[in-house]
Amino acid sequence: MTAAPAVVPLRRDGAAAVAFPSLAWFRHLADVMNANRARQEQLGYVDCVAQFTVTDGGLEGTPFAVQVTFEEFEALDVCVARPADDGRADFTLEGSLATWRAMIESIAAGGGRPDLEQTLNRLSHFGTPMRVVADDPLRRDLFFRYNQSLQEFVNAAATFTTRFGD
Amino acid sequence: MSHPLLTDVSRDPDPLDEGLARYEHAFRTQYRQWSEILQQNAERLRRGQYSLHWLDTDGASFGRRAKPSSRGLTYADVNAVKGYGDVPEVATWRNFTARGSVREPYRDAMPTIDDYTVTDRNELWAENVMSLYEEAKARQWNATRDIPWSELTPLPDDLEKATCQLCTFLTEVEFVAGDFPSKWMYRIPQDFLEVKSFLATQIMDEARHQEVFRKRAIAGGGLLHASPGFEWALKAILEAPSHTMGTFLLNLLGEGLVLSIFRSGEMIAKTHVDKEIFRRCLQDEARHVSYGVMELKWSLDHHPDRARALESMHTFADVGEQVILSAFTEAALVEPVAILLGGGLAKIDQGMEGMTKLWQMFIDEYLQRCERAGFPRRARCTIPLDIPWRVQ
């Protein structure tokens, strides 16, 4: 008796590593999620727009942010967040590049299951080193309502190689 | 001299016999309609006649077919069909008749279910209740199968005892969290079927939470201490004077606090088993909190005298917050969480510093949720904004 596998590996076959942070990296996560519909149907609906922000992941240490639109069992859309998109996301999960990197490396090392110290809730619960930001408490609570799905969304990073810019 | 056992039996009538006698009296002499119906049916059948009155669609919405959306056929889809989605402000059908069925011609012959007392929509409706119901069904999980129990490994004694004590507390809490909606669910008539359906999912969720924490404790060491402070807080929830007030106390305040505990539980979990348990549970809990916020909002927004409704809620919250506080200051809760936060009994003081953060976060989130519901509680909150204990 074990938990269902977090993700079904798609490719670790020498395909080119995907840079983090980048739109392509989050699109890879979305592709893996959408290719595993059976698992999503086990976990249940996810209906939210989640913004993932790397606070120093952009040019010259500026923020880099991506918005992922989840609907039903799919990640329908992945786009770079623009200032005009303010208010579109239900909540934002943000952390520094170093924090994201440690989490992604832990997910990869664990084959899709991060170390106890590297889960989304663990990292954000006390507001550091990650934090969940939302204007509306009901919209912030979506981060909790779909927490297992969001965790497995990022756990899909184990299915491809991530390249960091150093 | 008679046999003493026989004498005792004659002195103490069996309550079941008394209940049966009352039931028999009611249905044989007090209620006559059903036997008249039976007589009419028997005569018709004896004559070999069919009625076929039910084929008449006058007064029905028959023929307007509901169309499924991408998720299947939801309550929202069937409520979009004219004749089915009109949720009355006051339910006048205090029986089992389906909203949208042909029922008016039979009104006088219908029984009244005396227990259906929640007839005011403002006492239970929430704008998000149908979507929460769909989400709840879609996100069910199984405490027997979906937790990797075989990976559970023994923790150091202090951490295992702290985990088991936290699970003991949560087992108590989850029990009332199922009993409160159960207590009210059977008082809700058919016209509010959407709320009744959602409450059924909440009852299932809480049964699963009670199950998973009981299993976790017994698989790891065993159940530890019950606490009177827990029990009084849970009694205050169960005996709330109205559904809205109790839902505020359970779903918004109590489950909001338990949501914070679940998130802390996931954060401090020492095994992947515990991580999985708390992550699964916090999802369900956040759904219940969401209903609590929006139910209170609907109730206040639609009350004919909002100022009076607000004052009543404040009066209730003045008491409710304090009684809930009796649970959330109990040593049997605060200390195990502090030990888990700190990483061991020797580090309980560091853990209490973590409890300070947890407390402030919980109060802030509670007050934000009250404001979201249109219940400005910040100025009157009786729970101390800062921790009610001294950090060493």
Image (tube, rainbow, N blue to C red):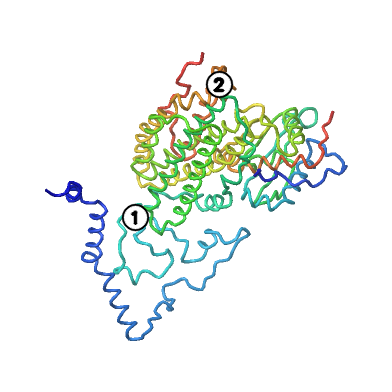
Q: Amino acid at mark 1?
A: Tyr
Where B129 falls versus B215 (above or below)?
below
Left/right placement of residue A48 relative to residue B54 reads: right
Where A62 falls versus B31 (above or below)? above
Residue B74: which quarter of the image?
bottom right
Residue for point 32% across, 84% down:
B46
Residue visible at 38% across and 81% down? B51
Query: Mark 1 against mark 2, which lies toward the viewer?
Result: 2
Camera-side residue: A160 or B161? Answer: B161
Q: Position of residue B236 (x, y in %)?
A: 36, 36
Taking the view exactly as shown, the residue that stands out farthest to the left is B1
- Which numbered marker is on residue B351? 2
Residue in the foreground of this view, choosing between B153 and B379: B153
Callout 1: helix, strand or loop? loop
Q: Give amino acid for label 2.
A: Gly
Which residue is pictured at 24% across the width and 55% down the height? B17
Q: Which residue is mark 1?
A: B116
Which disc is residue B369 wearing?
A: none
